[in-house]
Image (cartoon, rainbow, N blue to C red):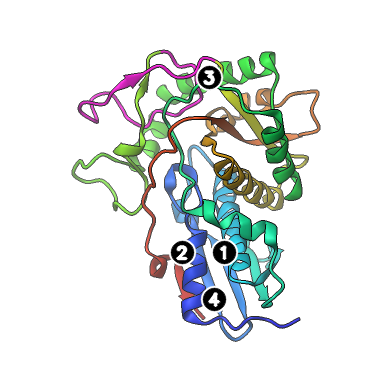
Amino acid sequence: MTTTALTRPLVMSLIEDAVTAPSMHNAQPWKFVARTDTGVIELHGDPRRGMPREDPDHRALHLGCGAALFGLRVAAAHRGRHPVVRLLPSPRDPWHLADVRLDGPDEADGELDALHAALSRRHTSRFPFTDERIPSEVVDGLCAAALSEGCRLVVPGAWHADTVMDLVHTSERFEAADEAVRAEIAAWTRTGAAGEGPDTEGIPAYAFGPRQYDVTSPVRDFGAPGQVRGRASARFENRPQLALLGTAADTPEEWLKAGQAMQRVLLQATLDGLATSLTSQPLEWPELRSGVRDPGSAVGFVHMVIRLGYGPQGQATPRRPVPEVLTFG
């Protein structure tokens, strides 16, 4: 077994794939350091890109970084390398989230490599899905994808799905009444108005999707009234097909595992022809989060609500340039 030398072109191509990952409000809270002397790529979280009001424990930040870590693993496998990952390698530095060493060539994981084509195709879709039900074998494959990363994907029954939607509605009311939360969301939306942040991050107006006539699907509305002229309204599916991603424990290591599982599920869903969107709204309020969990399930803590279905894939949202998130040491 040999360790791959970290040449600049190789590392830059790996990170370009990794940063296609989703993150809360597309804040992209990751930094990478390539240690050419040891052959290790370090993943660090960037707390400056956190959400103090919506994500005070940095759980969502870890999920996003975990998703980027999984993208890095897929990219490495696609290039014939075997990524060896160590989570939270520096006890004194909680923002040093992972080390990745590349072994190979000729030791790549074919299952990871098969997901590579979905990296550039996976986009959050805030558009209506059809009422076509997803075949059970496809759902089973997504559950297996989560399980392979040490997590569980649970499909709620009818009563539980209704409960989740009720909690989504409650979280929307909480959000509307909390000025700090509204300001935090506004800081990461991009409508072309003066004073907004860089157009390489955040949620652009074209990704808002239409407004819902009746809020029947758990799709966060990033467009405040009057922000985007001519924005259409549409009816969304009455019975959204949901899946809850969770783990037995609620620790930073488990959050990183859940982020990897989330990205694996999303990429597999993309290959299966599904459109997807994510919502964490009811999980952002401690008084609501426990209600999302099915008390009869083995999942102790839910980290993400995933909406699945058939419909528009959505458009790519911007990403920061690789030199902005990668340094060589």
Q: Are the residues at dot 2 and dot 3 in contact (C-beta closer than 8 Å)?
A: no
Q: Nearer the viewer, mark 3 or mark 1?
A: 3
Using the image, tell me which numbered label, if any, was put on residue 34: 4
The mark nearer the N terminus, 1 or 4, is 4
Identity of the residue drawn at 20% across and 28% down: 229
Q: Earlier in the sequence, mark 4 or mark 2?
A: 2
In whole angstroms, how far apart are the C-alphas of marks 3 and 1? 34 Å
- Label for residue 131? 3
Is label 1 in contact with label 2 (beta carbons under 8 Å)?
yes
Q: CA distance from mark 2 to mark 3?
A: 35 Å
Percent coordinates x, y for residue 60 in the rendering: 56, 44
Mark with earlier residue (4, 3): 4
Amino acid at the residue labelled 4: Ala
The magenta stretch spans residue 197: no
Which residue: 70% across, 63% down? 109
Does residue 153 appear anywhere in the picture? yes
Question: From the viewer's perspective, is residue 265 above or below residue 181?
Answer: below
Q: Is residue 146 above or below residue 94?
A: above
- In the rendering, which numbered label is found on residue 16? 2
Q: Secondary structure at mark 4?
A: strand
The stretch of residues the image draws in magenta is 214-238
Q: Amino acid at mark 2?
A: Glu
Q: Nearer the viewer, residue 272 or 303?
A: 272
| Earlier-in-chain disc, 3 versus 1 | 1
Q: CA distance from mark 1 to mark 2?
A: 9 Å
Q: Count neighbours of disc 1 (C-alpha within 10 A) and say few if under 14, some if 14 to 19, many if 20 or more.
A: many
x and y percentages locating residue 58 in the rendered image: 57, 47
Residue 50 at x, y = what percent? 48, 49
Asked if the magenta segment contains residue 237, the reply would be yes
Between the C-alphas of marks 4 and 2, the distance is 14 Å
